[in-house]
Image (cartoon, rainbow, N blue to C red):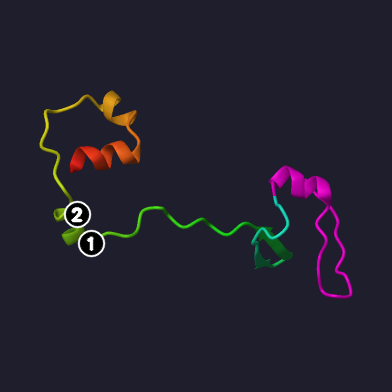
Amino acid sequence: MNARAKVLPSGDVAIPKDVRERLEWEPGTPLELIETPDGISLRRPARPSPFPPKTIDDLRNLPRYKGKPQPIEAISRLSNEDILRLLK
């Protein structure tokens, strides 16, 4: 999809409403400007992972599950809170 925009005297660029709605870009949405050989590209910044990086020692120190083995189907249905409760 291509659209046109104009640089305003203030330096702002107005993104057409139909583009903003389709991409779900609300006012205040952070965007990255990536310079390309042909101009620029706009995108949302990558979202940080909800899982912080771990070291081998961090993994070794994780709590261990002491109950009986569970089928993967049962584990897959658990929420993060359920899993943390089982590890206590």
Q: Secondary structure at mark 2?
A: helix
Is the stretch drawn in magenta largely helix, strand or loop? loop
Q: Residue 9: x and y, percent?
A: 89, 75
**Residue type, mark 2 in image:** Leu
Residue 84 part of the magenta segment: no
Q: Which mark is residue 59?
A: 2
**Residue type, mark 1 in image:** Thr
Q: Which mark is residue 44?
A: none
Q: Residue 46: x and y, percent?
A: 53, 57
Q: Residue 45: x and y, percent?
A: 57, 59
Q: Residue 56: x and y, percent?
A: 19, 59
For the record, the magenta segment spans: 1-24
Horizontal placement of 83 versus 3: left or right?
Answer: left
- Which quarter of the figure is the N terminus placed in? top right
Give the answer, above or below, for where 42 lies relative to 67: below
Residue depicted at 46% across the width and 58% down the height: 48
Give the answer, above or below, for where 24 lies relative to 52: above
Residue depicted at 82% across the width and 49% down the height: 17
Residue depicted at 67% across the width and 66% down the height: 33
Horizontal placement of 70 versus 10: left or right?
Answer: left
- Which quarter of the figure is the C terminus placed in? top left
Residue topped by disc 1: 55
Q: Nearer the viewer, residue 84 or 56?
A: 84
